[in-house]
């Protein structure tokens, strides 16, 4: 009957995905497609940002990595949660 376009995020990029729908009901997408887990590269970049934010003082690389991983996992968890709520609206 129609279609809609949604923005799909992943690997620090976004792409538009057009989905055909019939009778106005959106098919549920697996949440892993909507918001995957953070990649090693994303964690590495965030750890570097944390390192730079503390004036590039050496000595806490593991702490920076773990903090970055934790922050990004929480970010993706919130995205998945929001996506699940959004998908249920169309179900």
Image (cartoon, grey):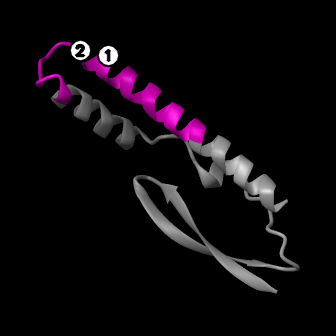
Return the mark for residue 39: none
Q: Nearer the viewer, residue 23 or 73?
A: 23
Disc ID at residue 60 = 2
| Coordinates of residue 41 in the picture (x, y in percent) | 36, 42
Q: How many labels does the image show?
A: 2
Q: Residues within 10 Å of mark 1 (few under 14, many from 20)?
A: few
Marks 1 & 2, CB-CB < 8 Å contact: yes
56 or 5, which lies in front?
Answer: 5
The residue that appears at 54% across and 40% down in the rendered structure is 76
Residue visible at 80% across and 62% down in the picture: 90
- Check disc 2 and report its element: helix, strand or loop: loop
Magenta residues span 53-78
Q: In this view, does 11 lie above or below 5?
A: above
SS at mark 1 in the image: helix
Q: Taken as a whole, is the magenta stretch helix, strand or loop?
A: helix
Q: Mark 1 points at which residue?
A: 63
Q: Distance between the residues labelled 1 and 2?
A: 5 Å
- Residue 71 picture quarter: top left
- Left or right of 20? Residue 91 is right
Q: In this view, does 73 lie to the left or right of 29?
A: left
Q: In the rendered structure, does residue 16 fall within the stretch colored magenta?
A: no
Above or below residue 56? Residue 23 is: below
- Quarter of image, res 86: bottom right
Q: Which residue appears at 34% of the width and 24% of the height?
A: 65
On the picture, is 73 further left or further right than 49?
Answer: right
Q: Where is residue 29 in the image (x, y as percent from the top left)?
A: 73, 58
Does residue 59 show up magenta in the picture?
yes
Q: Where is residue 52 in the image (x, y as percent from the top left)?
A: 16, 30
Please tell me which residue lies in front, 90 or 40. Answer: 90
């Amino acid at each position: 009957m129609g279609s809609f376009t949604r923005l799909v995020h992943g690997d620090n990029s976004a792409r538009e995905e057009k989905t055909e729908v019939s009778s106005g009901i959106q098919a549920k997408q697996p949440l892993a497609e909507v918001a995957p887990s953070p990649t090693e590269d994303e964690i590495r970049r965030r750890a570097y940002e944390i390192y730079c934010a503390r004036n590039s003082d050496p000595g806490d690389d593991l702490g920076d990595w773990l903090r970055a991983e934790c922050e990004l996992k929480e970010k993706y968890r919130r995205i998945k949660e929001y996506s699940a709520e959004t998908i249920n609206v169309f179900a």
